[in-house]
Every structure is written in structure tokens, then in C-alpha cells.
Image (cartoon, helix red, strand yellow):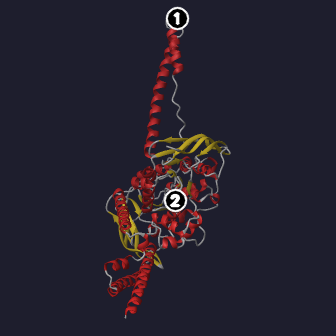
């Protein structure tokens, strides 16, 4: 197995913060590696070093002469008004036909390929960036949080692609389910050291836990033996008859060495609000319609949630999950119907539109003290602050200088210090590392209030949710079954679509004859031009009828994704209709020439 890239004795620091301290690692071809580590550990810095955008303080990165790097960046590299095809051609320097061919692997066609990228969802934009990577033919992909803001369906499509992709990958992600599905090896950055493990992330985390427990048990046994030997030596070294034996025991004592256990990194200790458990309905939606004055998203919503439920709101991006949550908390008025909360419900909200409006004049600690319920001790407030990475002097930071991620974490910390018995959380795992997400899940499992949340993290959702509410195709319904059964349903739909596309591709005629499939087939079966014209006239009538149906649907539909799909079908129909009409015209001229 050829080595593509080697990190040798690498060191890097910023001021007093040590990111790399004699770190070593090897990445071989065709191996997919999940790259994990705490927030701030230095993962993004290491990626920039591998890309040549930063330098090491000492050590080296040895690159194979055959290495071809491809990097999926978190920021968008698109120009204003640029279409997907224009971006692919600009980025790769490849002709339009080649760009279109690779884009097809990610179902990028029609408006998705020829329309402006700015109109596409985050998931579709990620597909465009992946297509761009492939056009450079890399043998090592660097993916930095590729699942951020992707809906479940697009995550699974990306998983399927990576599972089939025959090249090496280094994937930075906090999503354990995604890493488990795509990566066979794990790389961990902690305390400046890189640790490689020839197994999946869950196996690695279990290995760390078992190793720590084993070392602790071993050290406890060694310490007990030490005390026994020290006691024996103390009692016998002064007696002539036992002095030699005591000396022998002293040599045994010198050989006893404790296992080196690195001091534990600060562990997130999160406690959910302590509330009195309640019975009966917490939420009722009656004949509810959600959306905006110019566009309705979903209607006919009739739903009831009991106190103590932990409801996961699921569905593809753009279907209306956030719109539904905003309607529940009255930051968006219902289009029709009503939302009723039970008596005594105190609602706490974590969402983007909330944490962007934090008071700039407050410090981190001052904000948390104001949010904390009565009787909360300062140490408990500082513990929660530390769990969300506000430690030491950072608790004195003014809110005005915090980044978007820091504001999000501060808002979550404040919410968990409150007395809210209803928590509504929109993507609570964003901006949190694996350990903090796990600690948050543990806290919410102990929470005795009601939880309504959205999350793209399948591991988190599976652990926390007790019921699943799906927002799809203009409806909001309780999914009858567990989250695993919902995942199975989505997987089945995706696999059915992939089989259908594979069948269509196998049935499709060669490129040279594909342009006018229907007329050519008719011509092979029938040689009389008048009969061929009759067949074409029926085809034209059918295509024209469908075209009119789509135009009516386009006027009626309010869903952006459905609109795009209809527009794509309309373009395809226009091509087929034009080809059929041209062929009919040629035959008409031929017939007129016979007369």
C-alpha cells in the first residue's frame, strides 16, 4: 500500500497554545480516515498545513510525487450569479461536456446545473463542490465537516458516494454516524499528538475507554503492591536476619512502574434544567397551516405532544422544519389554525434567530448569571460555561466580540441554566465537538420536561428522540415507529431511486442515437413516412399535453424543490418536443416531394 502523505515530528504553536507537539501520522492510498478531536485541538490548522497554506514550526510533511489533493472547503467558492456548470468549468478548466458528465454522478442536471448556484440549498451546493473535486481527479480527498447543514437524504447520498469512491479520504467530522458509515480508520488529535487507529471511530472510542480502565486497574494493583513492599521493607531492613530480604524487596520496588496515564482533558459536564415532571398534553396543533403571506409551506396540521416527550422534527432541507418550529414559539404567525401550549409551560428556545440577538453590552458570565434560575451557584454557572468552552479569561469576554459559533454555544449554556420545562432546539449540536454533543445528549436524557428539536446528527437523534415528526410535501405528521425505522424508510427510498436510475441508464441508447430516441425507434419499425408522421403526431400531442399540465402545476406549487423538479421536466419535454416536430417537418417535406 503506497504512502501518499506522511507527517513527521510536526510541531506547531500559537503563543502558549500547543497544537502539534512532535506529531506523526501516515495516510496511505485508498484508505478513508475519520479525523476527530476536541474543538480548538488544531484539526483545521493541520488541514491548512497539509494544503501548504500554513507552515510547521518544526518537522515536515512528506508528500508523495503522485499525490493529488482535493479539498472540500466549508466556505463557498462561488461567484455572484454563477451557475453550477460555469463554476465547474471555471474551477476545473474542463469543457462543458466533461463537467456535465461528472455532475451527472451527483444528479446535477437541468436547473440544478444550468441555474444559479445561489438558488440551491446547502446540500445541492455541496454536491456541486464534490463534482468540482472529482474533475481534478484527486487521489486524496480532504473533507472539512462535509455534513454541516446537510439534510438526512443528502447525507446518505454523500455516504453512498464515499463508500464507492476509490481513493483515500481524510474526513474531519463530529458526526459519529457519518464517520462510521464512511471511514475504516481513525486519526485523533489530542494534546498535540496524532494517534492512528486501524478501525472505525466507535471502536476507537471504546478502545480508549477500555485502555483507560485497564491502566487505572493496573496502577491500583501496582500501588497496592508498592505499599505492601514499602511496609515489609520498613519492618525488616533494620533486622540483621531479614536485611538481605528487605534489600531484595527494595530492588523489586524500584522495578515497579506505573502506567503513564495522560491527565484527562476537561470533560463537558452538562445538566439540563431541573423541572417538575408534568402529565397530559404539552402541545396541541389544530388545523394549523404554516408559512408566509406569499407562500404556504404546510397545512392541515393536527398534532398533540404529551409532557415528557422528546420529539425529533425530521425532513429534507427546504421542507419547513424551521418554519414549523418558529410557528410553535410564535416568532412566526400561523397562516391558519392555532397552536396551544398547556398550562404552566415555560418555553426556552435555541435557534439562529435567537442567538444573533444576544445583548452586546453583556459579558459571557454576566449573560449566564442573568439567565440562570434562582439559587444557581456561581460555580455551577462557571461549570456550564466551561462545558461550552468558555474557560478562564474567556468568561469575561464581551458578547459583542463573540463569533457566531461562540454566540450559539453561549445561548445553549444560558438555556440549560434556566427553569424552562419546554425546550425547543434547532440544530443544538452545531458548533459542538463529539464529547460535548455526547454530554448534551446525556443531559437531555435526564431532562424531565418536554423537548422538541431538529438535528442532522443521527447518533444524537437516535439517542435522544422518543418520537419522530416528519415535515414533508406540505404535511406535518407523526411517524409511527422509531428513528431507526425512519432511517430504514429513507434508505429504501434512496436505494430504489438509485436502482431506477441504473435501470434507466442501462436501457438508454448510445449517445449518438439518444437524441431522438422515439422517432428513430418508429423509423426502424416502419418505413412508410406517412405512418411515421402519424406516430410522431401522437407523440407531439402527448408531449404538448404534459407540457400544459406542468405549466399549470408551476403556477400552483409553492414548494421550491417541487418547482425546480417541474422546471427540469419542462426543459426535458421542450427538447423532446422540438426534436419530434423537426423530424415531422422533415418527413412532411419528403412526402410533399413525392406528390
Is 284 above or below relative to 5?
below
**Residue tagged 1:** 240
Is 229 above or below relative to 401?
above
Quarter of the image where one finds residue 291: bottom left
Q: Is residue 314 visible?
A: yes
Foreground: 409 or 457? 457
Instruction: Tell me, for residue 149, which label it has, or none.
Output: none
Farthest-out residue, front: 594
**Residue tagged 2:** 134
**Callout 1: 10 Å neighbours few (<14), some, many (20+)?**
few
In the figure, is residue 556 to the left or right of 47? Answer: left
Residue at 44% in and 43% down: 199
Question: Is the C terminus in the top left, top right, bottom left or bottom right quadrant?
Answer: bottom left
Q: Please provide percent x and percent y for residue 375.
A: 52, 51
The mark that comes first in sequence, 1 or 2, is 2
Please tell me whether mark 1 or mark 2 is closer to you in this view: 2
Q: Please provide percent x and percent y for residue 588.
A: 39, 89
- Spatial CA distance of label 1 from label 2 is 81 Å
Foreground: 119 or 220? 119
Residue at 38% in and 90% down: 591
Q: Please provide percent x and percent y for residue 450.
A: 41, 59
Farthest-out residue, bottom: 595
Quarter of the image where one finds residue 422: bottom left
Q: Please provide percent x and percent y for residue 263.
A: 55, 37
Foreground: 386 or 550? 550
Mark 2 lies on a secondary structure that is helix
**Callout 2: 10 Å neighbours few (<14), some, many (20+)?**
some
Mark 1 lies on a secondary structure that is loop
Foreground: 405 or 419? 405
Q: Is residue 357 visible?
A: no
Amino acid at each position: 500500500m503506497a504512502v501518499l502523505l506522511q507527517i513527521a515530528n510536526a510541531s506547531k504553536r500559537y503563543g502558549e497554545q500547543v497544537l502539534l507537539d512532535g506529531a506523526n501520522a501516515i495516510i496511505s492510498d485508498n484508505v478513508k480516515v475519520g479525523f476527530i478531536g476536541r474543538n480548538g485541538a488544531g484539526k483545521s490548522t493541520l488541514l491548512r498545513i497539509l494544503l501548504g497554506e500554513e507552515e510547521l514550526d518544526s518537522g515536515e510533511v512528506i508528500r508523495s510525487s503522485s499525490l493529488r489533493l482535493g479539498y472540500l472547503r466549508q466556505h463557498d467558492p462561488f461567484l455572484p450569479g454563477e451557475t453550477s456548470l460555469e463554476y465547474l468549468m471555471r474551477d476545473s478548466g474542463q469543457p462543458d461536456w466533461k463537467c456535465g458528465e461528472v455532475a451527472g454522478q451527483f444528479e446535477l442536471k437541468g436547473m440544478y446545473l444550468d441555474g444559479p448556484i445561489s438558488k440551491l440549498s446547502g446540500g445541492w451546493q455541496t454536491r456541486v463542490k464534490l463534482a468540482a473535486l472529482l474533475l481534478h481527479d484527486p487521489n486524496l480527498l480532504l473533507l472539512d465537516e462535509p455534513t454541516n447543514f446537510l439534510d438526512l437524504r443528502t447525507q446518505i447520498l454523500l455516504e453512498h458516494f464515499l463508500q464507492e469512491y476509490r481513493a483515500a479520504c481524510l474526513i474531519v467530522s463530529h458526526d459519529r454516524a457519518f464517520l462510521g458509515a464512511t471511514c475504516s480508520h481513525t486519526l485523533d488529535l489530542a494534546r498535540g499528538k496524532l494517534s492512528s487507529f486501524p478501525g472505525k471511530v466507535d471502536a476507537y472510542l471504546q478502545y480508549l475507554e477500555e485502555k483507560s480502565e485497564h491502566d487505572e486497574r493496573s496502577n491500583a494493583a501496582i500501588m497496592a503492591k508498592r505499599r505492601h513492599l514499602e511496609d515489609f521493607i520498613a519492618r525488616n531492613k533494620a533486622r540483621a536476619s531479614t536485611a538481605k530480604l528487605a534489600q531484595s524487596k527494595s530492588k523489586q520496588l524500584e522495578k515497579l512502574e506505573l502506567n503513564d496515564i495522560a491527565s484527562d482533558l476537561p470533560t463537558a459536564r452538562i445538566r439540563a434544567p431541573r423541572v417538575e415532571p408534568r402529565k397530559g398534553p404539552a402541545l396541541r396543533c389544530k388545523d394549523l397551516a404554516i408559512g408566509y403571506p406569499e407562500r404556504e409551506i404546510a397545512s392541515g396540521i393536527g398534532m398533540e405532544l404529551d409532557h415528557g416527550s422528546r420529539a425529533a422534527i425530521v425532513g429534507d432541507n427546504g421542507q419547513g422544519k424551521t418554519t414549523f418550529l418558529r410557528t410553535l414559539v410564535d416568532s412566526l404567525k400561523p397562516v391558519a389554525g392555532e397552536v396551544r401550549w398547556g398550562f404552566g409551560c415555560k418555553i426556552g428556545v435555541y435557534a439562529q434567530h435567537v442567538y444573533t440577538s444576544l445583548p452586546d453590552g453583556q459579558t459571557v458570565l454576566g449573560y449566564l448569571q442573568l439567565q440562570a434560575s434562582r439559587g444557581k451557584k456561581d460555580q455551577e454557572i462557571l461549570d456550564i460555561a466551561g462545558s461550552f468552552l468558555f474557560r478562564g479569561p474567556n468568561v469575561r469576554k464581551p458578547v459583542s466580540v463573540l463569533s457566531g459559533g461562540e454566540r450559539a454555544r453561549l445561548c445553549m449554556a444560558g438555556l440549560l441554566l434556566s427553569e424552562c420545562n419546554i425546550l425547543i432546539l434547532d440544530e443544538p449540536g452545531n458548533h459542538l465537538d463529539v464529547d460535548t454533543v455526547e454530554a448534551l445528549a446525556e443531559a437531555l436524557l435526564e431532562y424531565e420536561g418536554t423537548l422538541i428539536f431538529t438535528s442532522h446528527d443521527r447518533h444524537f437523534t437516535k439517542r435522544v428522540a422518543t418520537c419522530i415528526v416528519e415535515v414533508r410535501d406540505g404535511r406535518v405528521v407523526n411517524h409511527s415507529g422509531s428513528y431507526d425505522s425512519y432511517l430504514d424508510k429513507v434508505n429504501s427510498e434512496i436505494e430504489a431511486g438509485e436502482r431506477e436510475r441504473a435501470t434507466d441508464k442501462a436501457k438508454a441508447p448510445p449517445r449518438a442515437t439518444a437524441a431522438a430516441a422515439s422517432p428513430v425507434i418508429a423509423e426502424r419499425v416502419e418505413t412508410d413516412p406517412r405512418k411515421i408522421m402519424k406516430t410522431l403526431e401522437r407523440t407531439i400531442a402527448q408531449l404538448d399535453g404534459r407540457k400544459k399540465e406542468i405549466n399549470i402545476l408551476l403556477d400552483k406549487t409553492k414548494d421550491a424543490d417541487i418547482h425546480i423538479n417541474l422546471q427540469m421536466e419542462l426543459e426535458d419535454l421542450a427538447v423532446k418536443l422540438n426534436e419530434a416536430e423537426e423530424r415531422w417537418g422533415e418527413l412532411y417535406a419528403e412526402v410533399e416531394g413525392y406528390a
